[in-house]
Image (spheres, rainbow, N blue to C red):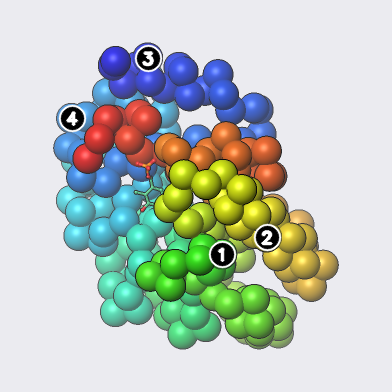
Amino acid sequence: MSITNNLKEIKKNIPAGVRLIAVSKTHSPEIILEAYNCGQREFAENKVQELGDKVDKLPKDIKWHFIGHLQSNKVKYIAPYVYLIHGVDSLKLLKVIDKEGKKNDRIISVLLQLHIAKEDSKFGLTEDNFFKVIEEYNTGIYQNTKVKGVMGMATFTDDESIVKEEFSNLKRLYDKGKMLIKDVDAFSEISMGMTDDYQIAIEHGSTMVRIGSAIFGNR
Ligand SMILES: *Cc1c(COP(=O)(O)O)cnc(C)c1O
């Protein structure tokens, strides 16, 4: 299978209104360019250094998503150009992003990452902390950050019922967040679904799927 065909196949399964984010981590700029030449414009990386290297080598109209665990001391490297940071899982990180947004004279879009999986290895806010972050954000002090929605990862399992339960839980939390957040119009994204579970994620309200292996092959 070629990247062209893979992208075509996936797009058949994705309704209008759900965005396809191509997860290009570990793949070379040449490979990424192949997907770019098929019209793909949104890509995601999970390492700051690797992302920086690729940005320099690839077309400027790419929207770069950051999907990894982001350390506060590394925000400054991606702040000038990052399109969307998916993994905000603490108030501390939100503060740093806001500060770097200000320095760069831009508003940085973020998603709040929620802990929905059974595994405790996965990062993310608890339900309580999610509401606390929204409360703090509602004070209006974060002028250089825009909270656009939520992100989550389901448990890595063949048991579809677990994945369904976790995705519907993320949707439920998103809905609650939408009731609480003041900047309600901006809050509109649910980033959920990867190669193995994106169809389930779409059934449960995903607006953004993050797909790597189904496009580029195994890493
Ligand atoms: C790697 C990664 C993906 C893509 O995974 P695939 O199974 O290759 O589609 C999606 N989201 C996050 C956060 C990732 O780290």
Mark before the other along the chain sequence, 1 or 3: 3
Q: Quadrant of the C terminus?
A: top left
Image point (45%, 60%), residue name: 85
Front-lying residue, 152 or 39: 152
Observer-side mark, 2 or 3, equals 2
Q: Mark 3 or mark 4, which is nearer the start of the sequence?
A: 3
In this view, the residue in front, 157 or 92, is: 157
Q: Earlier in the sequence, mark 1 or mark 4?
A: 4
Look at label 3 and name its amino acid: Asn
Q: CA distance from mark 4 to mark 3?
A: 17 Å
Q: Which residue is mark 3?
A: 5
CB under 8 Å between discs 1 and 2: yes
* Local SS, label 1: loop
Residue at (37% x, 47% y) in the render: 44
| Among the two numbered marks 2 and 3 on one chain, the one whose residue lies closer to the N terminus | 3
Residue 169 is marked as: 2
Which numbered tag is attached to residue 116? 1
Q: Gap in Å between the C-alphas at discs 4 and 2?
A: 38 Å
Question: Alpha-carbon neighbours of circle 2 within 10 Å: few (<14), some, or many (≥20)?
Answer: some
Residue farthest to the right, as pictured:
179
- Left-right relation of 111 to 30: right
> Residue 62 appears at what percent x and percent y?
38, 39
* Residue 183 is at least partly visible in this image: no
Amino acid found under the numbered disc labelled 4: Glu
Calculate the distance from the C-alpha at mark 1 to the C-alpha at mark 2: 7 Å
Disc number lying in front (4 or 3): 3
Quarter of the image where the N terminus is located: top left
Q: CA distance from mark 1 to mark 3?
A: 32 Å
Three-letter amino acid code at disc 2? Answer: Asn
